[in-house]
Amino acid sequence: MTARPGVVYLVGAGPGDPGLMTARSLELVAAADSILYDRLIPAAALAGARADAELRYVGKEPGDASVPQDRIHDELVDRARRGLSVVRLKGGDPFVFGRGGEEAEALRAAGVEFEVVPGVTAGVAAPAYAGIPVTHRDDASAVAFVTGHEDPGKGETALDWEALARFPGTLVMYMGVKNLPEITRALAAAGRDSGEPAAVVERGTLSGQRHVAATLETLAGAVNEAGLKPPAILLFGPVAARRDSIAWLERRPLHGKRVVVTRARAQASGMAATLAALGADVVELPAIRIEPRIESPEVRDAVEALHTYALVCLTSPNGVRLLFDAMEATGRDARALAQAQVAAIGPGTAAALRERGVIADVVPERSVAEALVEELEAVPVQGKPVLVARAAEARDLLPDALRGRGADVDVVPLYETVRENPAPDAVEAAMDADYVTFTSSSTVKNFLEVTGGRMPERARLVSIGPVTSATLREAGFEPDAEAGRHDPEGLVEALLGDAGDSAGRD
Ligand code: SAH
């Protein structure tokens, strides 16, 4: 049990990039009965929550008042007393301007057990993603975390501006964008060097992060001009000038490129993660979904008779997964394929087989039916039982060719690909893409159905192979790049190649 009943966990979710959530925070989100969360948590932070978990938003609505702090305390206490495991999820770190301290005290006063899970705080992470180290051996031996929430112009303030002006190190200020002109004026008036480097990082670690670099004197004007808005971190100190030599985010190969991934949902995440790791702003438009058909009598009969086939052909990693699911449902494993030659349409399908203990006998280099037909010419099939296990809507090229050579072919549909209706804002984001990726003919058809037949105007189109490219052309769109290797890795390679070329063209 990773989250104990009756315990409240005060958990930091990091500054926005879901990759900066701690292992412990992910574990607790996945285990909790109830999650009370704020506005500034990563969009994907709740993705791993249990389907039956209570997700309760207690943050501020833009413009609206937030749920009063007392109410939050009561809700935490109430849930813990009912024996639930409760995660109180906050942006950044719960004890850095997160009111985590107050909540811990309220829980202790109520006799409720709690644990604290620190998070990566925005004041360190946002500058880091902008290429600014908050300390540096030569420039800053101290850092101060400061709230910029209070207007220094308005009478009483908790901040000692003279002390901040004298502070021998970096000033990192949270919640200060709104009061930036007053803050910079107060610091300069209190004696901080007006020529000192300064920076603002907006939406640090999130896609679309922006920053402005200036001096204490010019910062407010520059930020106003650029139109930076909360959430943002203000930073004052010589380290702000280190950006020029350290900036790394924008050097990633696909930085600033919006890429649409249109694979079926179950497979989309792997490719999406690869693209995101290369710096892309990935829009997942799961235009299709795999609907398993392994309960059908045809599949059941084929699985019962698996040991009688001389040749078993698999045409996608999904097909492999579902065939093995169907086998397992009847108590079978890889040994059921012991008598057969096994053919995979390409390296991806062969890899899925290998994971399940089967090394394919026939694997063409190009993942297309034509290549598999050619490769299978070396395998005697005349008069032999052959199983082609595949998608319901696949082309008949392979079974036709095998029948033509006298094989006794059973074609068994393991799954159907059906259209998925994506969220309207995902479609809108997709229409502004730099790249759209297509991993099969059905992704082309489904994408166009979802967008009403339109392609994003300036997007370059990347296809996984010749069949998908042909489907694009039939629809009136010329692919800009085609994968040399017809699997997701090959597609990413082709996209990278194209991005590199277009960088040269710019
Ligand atoms: N507990 C949080 C801070 C909450 S106060 C933490 O440790 O990070 C809210 C302020 O945090 C915002 O006004 C902003 O100054 C800062 N902030 C939060 N997320 C941010 C982000 N992604 N980029 C820049 N600043 C951010």
Image (tube, helix red, strand yellow):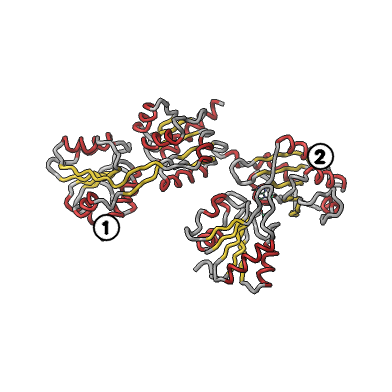
Residue plotted at (60% across, 42% down): 249
Residue holding disc 1: 333
**How far across and how far down the image is residue 329, in percent?**
28, 58
> Of residues 222 and 452, which is closer to you in this image?
452
Q: Quadrant of residue 242?
A: top right
In this rendering, would 496 be left or right of 180? left
Local SS, label 2: loop
**How far across and how far down the image is residue 450, in percent?**
44, 36
Q: Quadrant of residue 248?
A: top right
Q: Amino acid at mark 1?
A: Asp
Residue plotted at (76% across, 50% down): 148
Of the image marks 1 and 2, the number of the one nearer the N terminus:
2
Labelled pair 1, 2 in contact (Cβ < 8 Å): no
Residue 171 visible at all: yes
Residue holding disc 2: 217
Residue 127 visible at all: no
**How far across and how far down the image is residue 303, in percent?**
23, 53
| Disc 1 CB within 8 Å of nearest ligand 1 atom | no
Local SS, label 1: loop
